[in-house]
Image (tube, rainbow, N blue to C red):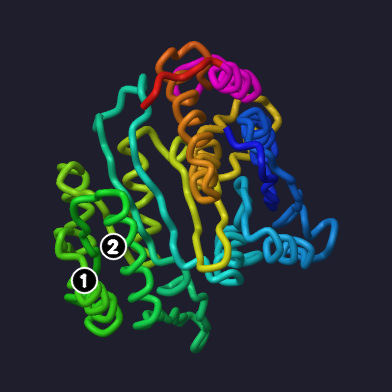
Amino acid sequence: MSTAKRHAVTLIPGDGIGPEVTDAVVRILDASGVKFAWERYSAGAEAFEKYEEYVPKELYESIGRTKLALKGPVTTPVGGGFTSINVTLRKKFELYVNFRPIKNLPGLETRYPNVDLIIVRENTEGEYVGLEHEVVPGVMTSLKVITEKGSTRIARWAFDYARKHGRRKIHAIHKANIMKLSDGMFLKCAREIAKSYPEITYGEHIIDNACMQLVMNPYQYDTLLLPNLYGDIVSDLCAAFVGGLGLVPGANIGADAAIFEAVHGSAPDIAGKDIANPTALLQSAILMLRHIDEAEAADRLQAATEQVYRERKTLTRDVGGTAGTKAFGDAVIAALEVPQPAR
């Protein structure tokens, strides 16, 4: 158990169910034996009410200082309003990797058992650069930006991860048959990087075919490497294999900073009712522990989470239980206190 170092972490509870799931996860982390110094800030509509800024400069300064953040869901208006806080923070801190492991939790029946997928999504380019404008009334354009630099660095990250963690193969997902220059650049860079990793099988699938193949047989894939928009869509599709967005983690990683977040929405309809499931943010926090070299605590916390799911006594309603957010957190903390068998 690590006791030597206190980790400064920027905490963004978010809105809707965000504060509830964040509080549960913070309690669990504080019970893990790892020491944290939490710097708490709001973002989005709540921040605007206080500071007249959707992302306060104090929040930017905190992440710039801690290089690490844990973030709950923040509501993004559809078709208007302010720009996505997620996209804003990813651009600001060059968090070019969106990393999402997709793996079943024990005790939950799903249509696809024993799924083990890694989604690596480019996080700063593509359609999400936000270069949109109205040409004439009724005609809009949106630019997709793919660069050699961006495509090369995300491909290298994916192959480095695969090598370090013993992953077997990587598929680059694209639409280069139609978007020959932009997606063609993405493929060209992936192919070039793949040459330096001969032990990893490299393949390519067109995005629409890949979606069909995933639904038919997700087990044929290991690690998927995708541009921004395709990665956003496919990572949500794959989350359905293991029970949905309420169960899977998300990490945004750059050279100098990382933000770990729940990838589901803010669910304002159930906010304040103590029924939200903290699992997605908890799984993200486990990724954060690994990122800061607290692997032993991460292993214990993963084992405690899996024990709670395996026993099925204190699960939230969305996964067939009757427990509340706080009770689920209490159960994970209790499981943490029980010595776990060596792995």
- How many tags in the picture? 2
User: Label 2: few (<14), some or many (≥20) within 10 Å?
Assistant: many
Location of the C terminus by quadrant is top left
Q: Residue furthest bottom?
A: 135
In the image, is residue 154 above or below residue 46?
Answer: below
Task: Pick whichever of labels 1 and 2 is earlier in the sequence.
Answer: 2
Q: Label 1, on which residue? A: 196
Helix, strand or loop at mark 1: loop
Circle 1 or circle 2, nearest the eye: 1
State whether the magenta stretch is mostly helix, strand or loop. Answer: helix
Q: Secondary structure at mark 2?
A: helix
On residue 335, the disc is none
Q: Which residues are magenta?
A: 317-337
User: Disc 2 designates what residue?
Assistant: 159
Q: Find out whether the residues at labels 1 and 2 contact each other: C-beta distance under 8 Å.
A: yes
Give percent across and percent down for residue 269. 62, 35
Relative to 335, is 239 on the left or the right?
left
x%, y% of residue 83?
61, 66
Report if residue 14 is visible in the image: no
Q: In the image, what residue type sits under mark 2?
A: Phe
Residue drawn at (59%, 39%) of the image: 267
Cα separation between marks 1 and 2: 9 Å
Q: Is residue 333 magenta?
A: yes
